[in-house]
Image: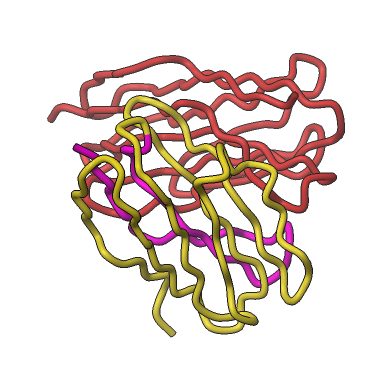
Chain colours: A yellow, B red
């Protein structure tokens, strides 16, 4: 059906507040990825979910970042006590299998004032 | 660690000009290589890929050849159109990393009529 969707599309928050970003992958896709794109930079890998396996959190920049995924459905990325350097576009992607073609959502633009 | 370096933009061309966007990579294993494109206001989408040395990926008139000897995956198109204006990202996926993509910083292409 539809592609990967993300919400909200834009989020402005104050430094120190917590934010939650949502990703709805393509139905049936077992793998889900979160990336961050800072202004003028390439995408940085944050976290990877594959089915019911333990997630690969190796890309999370600090313990303020966490993510959850229930089964093979929705994922949420939570950033606690946001800092200005967290300002970026957060992209979610899903694929049918690990190492398969990744389909990207439109991203959430986060601005921390 | 693995990395991708691509030529910095922006690149401005006239319609029907020849396009080359250089991309080189560093990887310890045998990565798959990708070009992703982000059209204005749209999400990131896969343009083409190559999974082993000497493979040529092609799509929409774009081509890139996986060159192991020069660790390169340069993107080319013989005659660009205004509709090709977008940001192009070179990326790799190390088979040992469960499909996580490592991206270059992106090259913005503007094609003038």
Spot occupied by residue A54 in the image (x, y as percentages of width and height): 77, 65
Number of callouts in the render? 0
Tell me if B33 is positioned left or right of B22 in this view. right
Residue A49: say if magenta: no
Task: Report the quarter where the N terminus of chain A lies.
Answer: bottom left
Which image quarter: residue A2?
Answer: bottom left
**Residue drawn at (82%, 16%), measured in percent from left and top?**
B69
Task: Assess whether residue A109 is covered by the magenta stretch.
Answer: yes
Q: Which residue is at 44% across, 74% downward?
A: A24
In the picture shown, does residue A36 fall above or below A71? above
Left or right relative to B21: residue A110: left
Q: Give the residues in magenta.
A: A86-113
Name the foreground residue: A21 vs B1: A21
Is residue B69 left or right of A30 when viewed as pictured? right
Q: Give the image location of residue A86, x and y in percent.
A: 37, 38
Residue B52 at x, y = what percent? 81, 40
Nearest the viewer among B32 and A57 is: A57
Q: Identify the residue at horizontal 47%, vertical 67% (top origin).
A: A76
x and y percentages locating residue A27 in the rendered image: 53, 83
Q: Residue at x 72, y 31 (%)?
A: B66
- State the quadrant of the C terminus of chain A: top left
The part of the image, by quadrant, that contains residue B14 is top left
Q: Is residue B14 left or right of residue B19?
A: left
């Amino acid at each position: 059906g539809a592609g990967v969707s993300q919400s909200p599309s834009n989020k402005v928050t104050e430094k120190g507040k917590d934010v939650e970003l949502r990703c709805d992958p393509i139905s049936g896709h077992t793998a889900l990825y979160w990336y961050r794109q800072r202004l003028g930079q390439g995408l940085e890998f944050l976290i990877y979910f594959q089915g019911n396996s333990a997630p690969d959190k190796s890309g999370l920049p600090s313990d303020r970042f966490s993510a959850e995924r229930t089964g093979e459905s929705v994922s949420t990325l939570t950033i606690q006590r946001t800092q200005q350097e967290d300002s970026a576009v957060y992209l979610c992607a899903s694929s049918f299998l690990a190492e398969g073609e990744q389909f990207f959502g439109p991203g959430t633009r986060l601005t921390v004032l | 660690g693995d990395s991708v370096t691509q030529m910095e933009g922006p690149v401005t061309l006239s319609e029907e000009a020849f396009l080359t966007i250089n991309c080189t990579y560093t990887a310890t294993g045998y990565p798959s290589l990708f070009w992703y494109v982000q059209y204005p206001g749209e999400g990131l989408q896969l343009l083409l890929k190559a999974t082993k040395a000497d493979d040529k990926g092609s799509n929409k008139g774009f081509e890139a050849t996986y060159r192991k000897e020069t660790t390169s995956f340069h993107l080319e198109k013989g005659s660009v159109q205004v509709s090709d204006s977008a940001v192009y990202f070179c990326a790799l996926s190390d088979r040992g990393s469960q499909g996580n993509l490592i991206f270059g910083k992106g090259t913005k292409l503007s094609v003038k009529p």
